[in-house]
Amino acid sequence: MATIDRNTAPTVQEVEEFLEQIDFTLPKGFIEFFKESNGADISTDESYTLLWALTDMIQLNKDYSVEDYAPEFFIFGSDGGDTAYAIEKSTSDIYEMPFIGMSKEEAVFKSKTFTEFIESF
């Protein structure tokens, strides 16, 4: 059973600003989750997942040079270590991939929707 420690919800304006800056379709359930929680920590006995704050995602993708190394993806979180969780822009599917060596070739499919991704914990 996963424990989800949610951050305070972003403002309506912050959500709108995020949506204006992206040029791809988000997975089902993604924006609904992030309207209620500006990021979260998800932990189980076996794993830890950090969902980045919606208000930080654009800048963090720039900081990690995602456009240079894996332009097909948009990262929204990590395992707190070397694994990133990302949306494939062309399909809205969710993948995991390493931060070091991030690329389409290294991406591993996780789920079709954000709801499935959360339920996988």
Image (cartoon, rainbow, N blue to C red):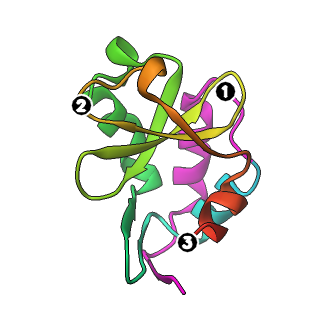
- In the rendered image of this protein, does residue 59 appear above or below residue 38? above
In this figure, which residue is indicated by the disc labeled 1?
24
In this figure, which residue is indicated by the disc labeled 2?
63
- Circles 3 and 2, Cβ within 8 Å, touching? The answer is no
Picture quadrant of residue 59: top left
Mark before the other along the chain sequence, 1 or 3:
1
Q: Disc 1 or disc 3, which is closer to the eye? A: 3
User: In the picture provided, is 105 more to the left or to the right than 91?
Assistant: left
At a point 41% along the width and 57% down the height, the residue shown is 53
In this figure, which residue is indicated by the disc labeled 3?
121
- Circles 1 and 3, Cβ within 8 Å, touching? The answer is no
As rendered, which of 70 and 104 lies closer to the eye?
104
Instruction: Look at label 2 and name its amino acid.
Output: Asp
Spatial CA distance of label 1 from label 3 is 25 Å
Instruction: Look at label 3 and name its amino acid.
Output: Phe
User: In the picture provided, is 80 more to the left or to the right than 112?
Assistant: left
Q: Which mark is residue 94?
A: none
Residue interval drawn in magenta? 1-27
Residue 99 position, x and y percent, is: 28, 35
Residue 80 position, x and y percent, is: 26, 58
How many discs appear? 3
